[in-house]
Amino acid sequence: MPPSSIAATPIPTDIAALSFEDALAELERIVRQLEEGRGKLDDAISSYERGTALKRHCEAKLREAQAKIDRITVSADGSIGSEPARID
């Protein structure tokens, strides 16, 4: 599947219901399993596809968290805005 079609594929509902921590733990388990290279090719392909969906879900959760911590600003003219948080 080309990368653009992977991004357009909806995240399965069971993955979408996972917390960031649970999704990351499952993704780590899949990566370890794939690195070991044991098992059937079809299982590895399915695991890779699930891992891709888990990665996208984790990235979306991180973007949501980033949006929540954007800093609210007040300019000299009194208008209110926001700017990205600086996480250093």
Image (spheres, helix red, strand yellow):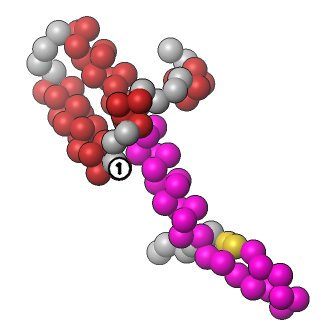
User: Looking at the picture, does residue 57 appear above or below residue 82?
Assistant: above
Residue 22 lies in the magenta-colored region: no
User: Looking at the picture, does residue 47 appear above or below residue 64?
Assistant: above
User: Looking at the picture, does residue 45 appear above or below residue 17?
Assistant: above
Q: In front: 48, or 62?
A: 62
Using the rendered view, name the quadrant where residue 18 is placed: top left
Is any atom of residue 29 visible in this view? yes
Residue sitting at x 53%, y 53%: 63
Q: Position of residue 12 (x, y in %)?
A: 42, 27
Q: Residue furthest right?
A: 77
Residue sitting at x 88%, y 89%: 77
Q: Which residue is mark 1?
A: 20
Q: Which residues are magenta?
A: 56-81
Using the rendered view, name the quadrant where residue 44 is placed: top left
Q: What is the three-letter code of the residue carrying label 1?
A: Phe
Q: Position of residue 1 (x, y in %)?
A: 50, 14
Residue 72 lies in the magenta-colored region: yes
Is any atom of residue 35 visible in this view? no
Q: Is residue 33 left or right of residue 47?
A: left
Q: In front: 45, or 64?
A: 64
Which structural element holds mark 1? helix
Residue sitting at x 41%, y 37%: 16
Total numbered labels: 1
- Which class describes the residues within 10 Å of circle 1: few (<14), some (14-19), or many (20+)? some
Q: Is residue 84 left or right of residue 11?
A: right
Q: Position of residue 3 (x, y in %)?
A: 54, 24
Q: In front: 44, or 8?
A: 8
Q: Is residue 58 left or right of residue 84?
A: left
